Each structure stands twice: as structure tokens, then as C-alpha cells.
Amino acid sequence: MKKYFILLLLSLICNLSNANKWNLLKSGERWNILQVIYNPDMVHHDSTTYFVKFEGDTIINAHTYSRVLKATDVEFNNWTLNGFVREDTLIGFYYRSLQEKEGLLYKYNLRIGDSVVIINTNGWSDSIRYLVAGIDSVQIEGKYKKRYIMNQKHYEYMPETWIEGVGSSLGILNCGLIDAGGATRLLCCYENNVLIYKNPDYQDCYYSTNTALHSIKDLETGINVYSGTTSNVIFIKSQVDNYIRIFNSYGMFIEVVHVLANLEYNLNVAKYSKGVYVISPSTNSFGAKKFIVY
């Protein structure tokens, strides 16, 4: 019995130590997030950089929450309330919307192969099941933080990453948010206005509407789409291996196809209904194309 108690105590201490490395409610932290919304022509896009921070405590149903504040002006003159967050060091990180819906955004102490259900009350889906596909580490402020590769069942070709103390690669509160009409990406994370993490896929921590689409490295990883000799075939070509998502004009997911680097892929659209379709590559979230089935 004594041996069992000691093992249980050591396990608890180990879990608590690992959970403390997240510390997402650390005072003075701010996240810069890029948001891009696709326009119907799939060429010109609307983009903005917005900012998120947690500040001030409040009690709701006997739990202590921090207020979620959001700003869209680069001078940070206008912060607005966007919800509430709390952290259970043994379980994970919770978000509560202004509509009083709450869900688990980050589960702590995960291992490779673990499955976890995340509930993002900002999304169109009630819940999203993740599989931990891999774990490595990144260095932040001279310390190594774990990075988790999180896959979704229907989006395994488009992994999302979590970093301890930083959060999701989609943005601190954007876990699992996949939208055919746009995309979000974490740009940078600051602590007391000091940069502690910068997304390596971007040159800067802020982008205006005119520059956002030029920020991504390796823009050549986009795709070319053109019509075949018959109306039933669309040709797709990519300079790198690509998993191509296809959506209809209502944003509904149709299918995914695997396009090999520099090889022409013949997409048979005879089974598609008439209308406009969007092709979105996994290697370049802002390089979507469209085609029409007559």
C-alpha cells in the first residue's frame, strides 16, 4: 500500500510539473494572429491581424476565469471582451464564450497515440477529435517546450500543432477551426511586449491587407488548375506533394485527392453537380483556386 501511494504521488508530481509548462494564463502574454477571408474570385482576399490577451480575474460558478480581450488596431487602443478562460493544471485549458458555452481547448499531459475530444464553442462543430501524431520540442526563452502534432480524422493531411506556453498554430483560441472560406495562423507570441515565439513560416508579426498574402514562405508550393479537353476533366499540378481539398460554393467539403509533385492529376468531375468549386492545397493555406462545372 505504501509503495502504491509513493508511485501515485510521484505520478501526480510529474503530471503537475508537465502541466505547469503550459501556463497559458501567464501575466503579460499577447498573441498576434493573422486572419484571411477568401473572396469569391479566389484571387483577392481580405486579411487582418488581430491581437488576443488574457487580463483580470472574475468568478463564474465558483471557478476563477481570466477575461479574453481582443483588439484589431495595432496601437492596442480598443480592447473588447471576447469571452473567458481558465486553466486546470491537471486537466487542461478551458474557454467560455460570451454565450456561456464552455469547452476544453487544450488537454495537458498527452502522449503519442492519445485521442482527445476538444470542444471549441467558436466553431461550427460541437466537438473535434484529435489524435496526437507526434511530439518534439522547440526552444523558447532558453527552455525546451513540447510541441504536439495534432491530427483530425477528416483533416489528417493538414496537421495543427500545439506548443506549451504558446498554444495552437491556428491561434490561441482557434483549436480545430477549419473553414473553407478562410484561415487563421498564429504569427507571434509576446510576454510583456518581448517576443518569445515567432512563426517560422512568416517574416513579420503584423500584416496589413496589402501585404498579408505575400508573407508566406515558399509561395511556389501553390497549385495550377486548368481545364482538360473534355468538360468532365480538370487538371491539377503542384510543385510539391499536396493533399488537395475540394469544397463547393457553400463551403461544404467534397473530397480530398493526393497530387504528387510535378505530376499532372486528372480530376474527374462528372460526378459533381453544376456550380463553382474551390480547390485548396494543404501546403499553402492561401493558395486556393476555383473551377466551374457546367
Image (tube, grey):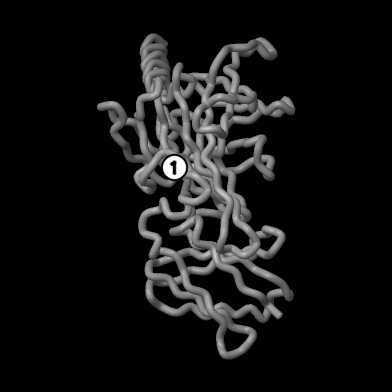
Count of marks, rendered view: 1
Q: Toward which corner of the image does residue 263 lie, by quadrant? A: bottom left
Direction from residue 236 to residue 220 in the image, left or right:
left
Q: Is the C terminus in the top left, top right, bottom left or bottom right quadrant?
A: bottom right
Q: Is the N terminus in the top left, top right, bottom left or bottom right quadrant?
A: top left
Name the residue rendered at 54%, 49% in the picture.
152
Residue 90 to residue 177: above or below: above
Name the residue rendered at 71%, 28% in the picture.
101
Determine the residue located farthest toward the left in the rendered image: 142
Q: Amino acid at mark 1?
A: Thr
Q: Label 1 belongs to which residue?
A: 161
Q: Position of residue 121 (x, y in %)?
A: 66, 35
Q: Position of residue 11 (x, y in %)?
A: 39, 20
Q: Toward which corner of the image does residue 128 lie, by quadrant? A: top right
Q: Position of residue 209 (x, y in %)?
A: 53, 48
Q: Position of residue 69 (x, y in %)?
A: 58, 24
Q: Is residue 131 visible?
A: no
Q: Is residue 110 visible?
A: yes
Q: Residues within 10 Å of mark 1 (few under 14, many from 20)?
A: some
Between 200 and 106, the one lying in front of the other is 200
Residue 243 to residue 207: above or below: below
User: For the residue labelled by badge 1, is the local secondary structure a helix, a strand or a loop?
Assistant: strand
Name the residue rendered at 41%, 53% in the picture.
216
Name the residue rendered at 37%, 12% in the picture.
6
